Image (tube, rainbow, N blue to C red):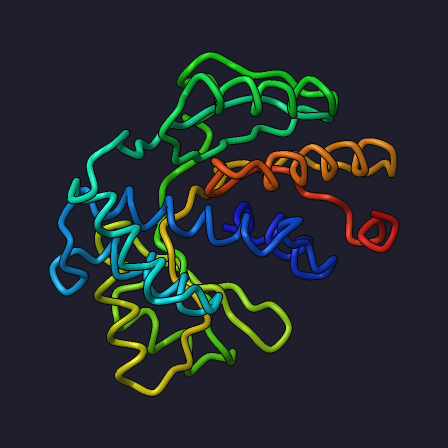
Amino acid sequence: MSGHSKWSTIKRQKGAKDAARGAVFTKLGNAIAVAARGGADPEMNFTLRLAIDKAKAANMPLANIERSIDRGSGRLGGEQIQEVLYEGYGPGGAAIIVECATDNLNRTYPEVKLAFSKHGGNMAEKGAVAFQFDQKGMIRVKGKGDDLMLQAIDAGAEDMEEEDDESVIYTGPKNLAKVRDTLREAGVEILEAELTFVANNMVAITDQETAGKVVRLMHALEVIDDVSATHTNFDIAEELHNTL
């Protein structure tokens, strides 16, 4: 299930971040607003609880978090934030899903389309790419080893991968809350937890030029304020990572 971790690993290795702290808060606020549409109480709305946890980990001020909840739940009025999924292909045939949270589709779609076209990719019709992915719960934790894997499986996880001194645990979408809370209660250090899209099959990229192009496309998508997450199925050869 390395479809999620390949791109996220490269981002961490390169220290990829949004151009400005304000952009980070914009993305986090939009994610909270979207989640709050399902209920403003994080104790009753696990998706909202995940979004709030992520915002707190990024040191987003409490006032910003509360304002985003109010916005999503309709208390502030104005244009509602909505979720939209865009699909496309990048250099080397990499399949890409772009999750957005926006109050203006007329702004978001052209920005996403421009990023694809500028970096050797193209957008696809709805459903043309998404069928290549499964939605999963993803929990990144400190530690690794057989004991941790047994704990995760007993808690209801489907699979686990080790990355350096961390592990990535995958669950069914509906089991994410249960597995995360069970592991946390058992003393496992949770680094992040979210719903993600995991590729069924990977596309190998073995030449430096194509690897550079597809990574530049992914970065261009990530820095768009309305983009909340990106998912792809590329597998860049390990020896090329230091050249990106």
- Residue 107 left/right relative to 65: right
> Depth check: 173 or 77 in front?
77
> Depth check: 116 or 5 in front?
116
From the top left corner, tell me how far across and down residue 230 is, in percent: 52, 39
> Depth check: 95 or 18 in front?
18
In the image, what residue occupies the spot 25% across and 76% down? 182
In the image, what residue occupies the spot 64% across and 57% down? 9
> Depth check: 38 or 173 in front?
38
From the top left corner, tell me how far across and down residue 12 is, in percent: 65, 60
From the top left corner, tell me how far across and down residue 65 is, in percent: 32, 59
In the image, what residue occupies the spot 41% across and 74% down? 190
User: Residue reaching furthest bottom?
Assistant: 187
Count of all numbered marks drawn on residues in the image: 0
In the image, what residue occupies the spot 72% across and 25% down? 91
In the rendered image, the vertical position of residue 104 relative to residue 80, given as above or below: above
Determine the image quadrant of residue 83. top left
- Residue 110 left/right relative to 43: right
Determine the image quadrant of residue 212. top right
User: Residue reaching furthest top?
Assistant: 125
- Residue 150 left/right relative to 42: right
- Residue 69 left/right relative to 108: left
Determine the image quadrant of residue 15. bottom right
In the rendered image, the vertical position of residue 230 relative to residue 58, given as above or below: above
